[in-house]
Structures are given as C-alpha cells and as structure tokens.
Image (tube, grey):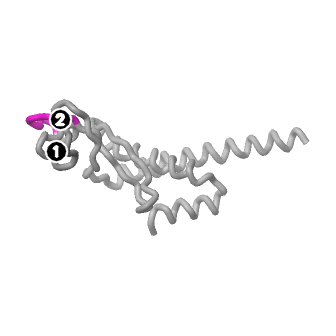
C-alpha cells in the first residue's frame, strides 16, 4: 500500500482534511529522520505525482568534504546543479535510511497530532451544540 492510499483511507475513516493529514505525515517523517541524523539540515515534502514522501538535505558546496551529512564537493554539486558555486547551499535527495526505532518516533508524532486535531474538532462541535 502506497502512502497516498493510507492518507486517503485516513481522510475517509476519520474525516480529516487531506492537506492537513499530509502535513502531519511529513512532520512525523521529519521527526524520524532528525532523530537518526540530528546534524543534517533536513526537510520533507509530499510529492503528489509519485505519492511518496521526499526527504531532502541542505548541503554546503565545498572544495573538500569533511562532513558527508552537511557538505557536498563542487564536482558532485555541479553534476546536479550546473551553476553551483563554492559556499552555496543546495538541497538534494537525502540517501540516509531510518530503522525501527525512528519509525516508531514517526508513528508517535503522527498519532499525537491526529489526536490533537480530533480533540480540537470535538471541542468545537461541543461548543457549537451548547450555543443551540
């Protein structure tokens, strides 16, 4: 089952907004990757075409790489971005992987945010009913 299918199922099952739920999933995945790679400048987005979460890392273009997680050499950067220059920051696909513990972290973040949204919508409904 692809991620977009899971999101669609949750939208139908729980009545949540699709964009909000997509953001929650991205937040959860970002938390998981940040747990494993705290030194990397990561970002996560949902690619609607592929239906997958895309993890990217921001790296500084340098002559000699001393930290693989935060730097990229000029030659490799230019193979990806023709106009890359030394000192510039570039965003590239992150190739790191996460394990079971990090997946549990993502699950916790996603579940907590969904719970918060559901509780806040219940409170709004209760206040609305009290006014009637």
Number of labels in the image equals 2
Instruction: Name the residue beneath numbered marker 2.
Output: 85
> Residue 23's spot in the image, x, y percent?
50, 47
Which residue is found at the position 29% from the left and 42% from the top? 91
Which residue is found at the position 19% from the left and 39% from the top? 84
Q: Quadrant of the C terminus?
A: top right
- Residue at the outermost front position: 83
- Which label sits on residue 78? 1
Q: Which SS class for mark 2? A: loop
Q: Which residues are magenta?
A: 60-67
Q: Quadrant of the N terminus?
A: bottom left
- Residue at the outermost bottom position: 1
Q: Which SS class for mark 1? A: helix
Tell me: residue 117, above or below residue 2.
Answer: above
- N-terminal of the pair, mark 1 or mark 2, is 1
Which residue occupies the foreground of this view, 91 or 132?
91
- Quadrant in the picture for residue 12: bottom right
> Residue 109's spot in the image, x, y percent?
48, 45
- What is the C-alpha distance between the residues marked 1 and 2? 8 Å
Provide the major secondary structure of the magenta segment: loop
Which residue occupies the foreground of this view, 61 or 122?
61
> Residue 102's spot in the image, x, y percent?
36, 49
Contact between labelled residues 2 and 1, with CB atoms less than 8 Å apart = no
> Residue 80's spot in the image, x, y percent?
21, 49
Q: Is residue 73 left or right of residue 1?
A: left
Q: Is residue 68 left or right of residue 104?
A: left
- Which label sits on residue 68? none
Tell me: residue 66, above or below residue 13.
Answer: above
- Residue at the outermost left position: 64
Which residue is found at the position 31% from the left and 52% from the top? 98
């Amino acid at each position: 089952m692809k991620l977009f299918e899971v999101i669609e199922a949750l939208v139908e099952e729980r009545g949540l907004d699709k964009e909000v739920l997509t953001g929650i999933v991205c937040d959860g995945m970002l938390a998981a990757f940040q747990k494993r790679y705290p030194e990397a400048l990561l970002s996560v987005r949902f690619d609607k075409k592929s239906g997958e979460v895309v993890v990217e890392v921001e790296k500084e273009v340098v002559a000699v790489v001393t930290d693989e997680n935060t730097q990229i050499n000029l030659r490799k950067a230019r193979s990806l971005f023709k106009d890359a220059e030394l000192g510039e920051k570039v965003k590239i696909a992150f190739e790191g992987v996460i394990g079971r513990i990090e997946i549990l972290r993502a699950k916790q973040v996603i579940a907590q945010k969904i719970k918060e949204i559901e509780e806040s919508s219940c409170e709004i409904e209760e206040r609305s009913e009290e006014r009637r």
